[in-house]
Image (spheres, coloured by chain):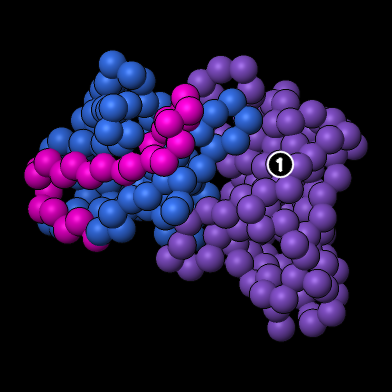
């Protein structure tokens, strides 16, 4: 079955560490997205990519970095510059060129310890 | 101003009741609209797209009012399993914006 896979499900980060969250999709979707969700709040866009080797900053890109070397993969690195990284991170993909919604992965819960 | 705004609720309704809620969007150029459902500590899942003429999917009805820039969701004959947070989504081809969600609790 086609889908979008995020790993790990839970991640613990020490102060000053960089960590990378994985996102892989086999839906052949062109566009991929990273969102952050804090308790009781909506989704905020971190980065998005419409095609391979290209990506744009979202509303809260500071302290994060991404790459899009393959159509299927869009990993997110949470750097030590992100001062409040504890959150639920959601990766999504979507076909463009029409009225298509997002398909989400099951998310990664990141906690700073 | 946020691009998409929703009444956070909560809406507490008995089983079998009808519940409806709206969301407003600020970007008049938005072309695509959706309702997503999110259960506690889970990822959002697409409930339905919203079309200009309005559309129905079983007990769920979505409407779009472009003049007033809002979309609505109506749930008929509420079930316990409808308890969730409903996210309003609007945008264009390359980027969608999410509302913070409306919480619905259906009680027995």
Question: Closest to the observer: A54 or B20?
Answer: A54
In the picture, which quadrant includes the N terminus of chain A? top right
**Does the magenta segment cover residue B69?**
no
Residue A96 in sight here: yes
Residue A66 versus residue A4 in the image, above or below: below
Residue A85 appears at what percent x and percent y? 68, 70
In the rendered structure, the answer to whether residue B19 lies left or right of residue B93 reads: left
Q: Which chain is purple?
A: A
Residue ID at (64%, 24%) = A95
Residue ID at (36%, 26%) = B50
Q: Residues within 10 Å of mark 1 (few under 14, many from 20)?
A: many
Residue under label 1, please give it.
A48
Q: Chain B appears what colour?
A: blue
Determine which quarter of the picture holds residue B49: top left
In the rendered structure, the answer to whether residue A45 lies left or right of residue A69 reads: left
Residue B105 versus residue B18 in the image, above or below: below
Residue ID at (33%, 50%) = B6
Badge 1 marks a residue whose secondary structure is strand
In the picture, which quadrant includes the C terminus of chain A? bottom right
Task: Give the residues in magenta.
Answer: B10-36
Residue B40 appears at what percent x and percent y? 42, 59
Residue B22 appears at what percent x and percent y? 26, 42
């Amino acid at each position: 079955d086609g889908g979008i896979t995020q790993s790990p499900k839970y991640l613990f980060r020490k102060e000053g560490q960089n960590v990378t969250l994985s996102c892989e999709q086999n839906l052949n979707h062109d566009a991929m997205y990273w969102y952050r969700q804090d308790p009781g709040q909506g989704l905020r866009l971190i980065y998005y990519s419409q095609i391979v080797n290209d990506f744009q900053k979202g509303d809260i890109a500071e302290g994060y970095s991404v790459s899009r070397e393959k159509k299927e993969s869009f990993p997110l690195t949470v750097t030590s510059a992100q001062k409040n990284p504890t959150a639920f991170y959601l990766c999504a993909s979507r076909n463009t060129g029409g009225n298509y919604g997002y398909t989400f992965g099951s998310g990664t819960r990141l906690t700073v310890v | 101003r946020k691009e998409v705004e929703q009444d956070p609720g909560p809406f507490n309704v008995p089983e079998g009741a009808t519940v409806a809620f709206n969301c407003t969007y600020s970007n008049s150029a938005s072309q695509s609209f959706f309702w997503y459902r999110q259960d506690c500590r889970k990822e959002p899942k697409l409930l339905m797209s919203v079309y200009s003429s309005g559309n129905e999917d079983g007990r769920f009805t979505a409407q779009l009012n472009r003049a007033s820039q809002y979309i609505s969701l109506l749930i008929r004959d509420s079930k316990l399993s409808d308890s969730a947070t409903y996210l309003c989504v609007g945008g264009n081809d390359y980027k969608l914006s999410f509302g913070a969600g409306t919480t619905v609790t259906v009680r027995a």
